[in-house]
Image (spheres, rainbow, N blue to C red):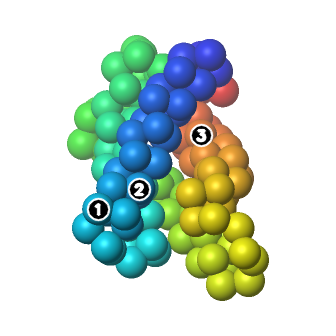
Amino acid sequence: MLGRNTVVSTAVFVFDMALLWALVELLGMDKILAAAIGFVAANSAHYAFGRSWIFAGTDRAVLTGYLFFLINSGVGMVITLGMYAAFLAWTPINYLVARVIVSLFAGLAVFLLNAILNFRRL
């Protein structure tokens, strides 16, 4: 399960980072707003893969599971955007590097919340 989560998490994170870069560099969007959009897009994809491959066989209904996933992702988004804003405000670290660092903390938190509360498997 952890190996599958690593594969999916890595793929959606690459998508998230590419979207963040494109929104900031190509469209001139605010870095915090771009990070929020990337987070929502990547986490929605992560749910689809999580339900069908990482936690295959879960007994929770799709809609109920997605609602739990959104709640858990909301926690992850608060962690992500809060830490990301702090890095941008208080450090000279590049915005993409800051997002990578933040993802380590937020990703682990969201995985644990989903494994324990949503898919009931750890």
Q: Quadrant of residue 86?
A: bottom right
Compared to residue 35, the image places residue 104 above or below, namely above
Residue furthest to the bottom: 89
Residue furthest to the front: 26
**98 or 92: nearer the viewer:** 92
Res. 14 visible in picture: yes
Q: Quadrant of the C terminus?
A: top right
Point out the tag, 1 or 2, that comes first from the N-terminus.
2
Q: Are marks 2 and 3 in contact (CB under 8 Å)?
A: no
Q: Which residue is mark 2?
A: 21
Q: Nearer the viewer, mark 1 or mark 2?
A: 1
Q: Residue at the spot x=64%, y=21% of the render?
A: 2
Point out the tag, 2 or 3, that comes first from the N-terminus.
2
Res. 37 visible in picture: no
Q: Amino acid at mark 3?
A: Phe
Find the distance from the CA under tag 2 to the CA under tag 3. 24 Å
**54 or 101: nearer the viewer:** 101
Q: Which residue is mark 1?
A: 26
Q: Which residue is mark 3?
A: 111
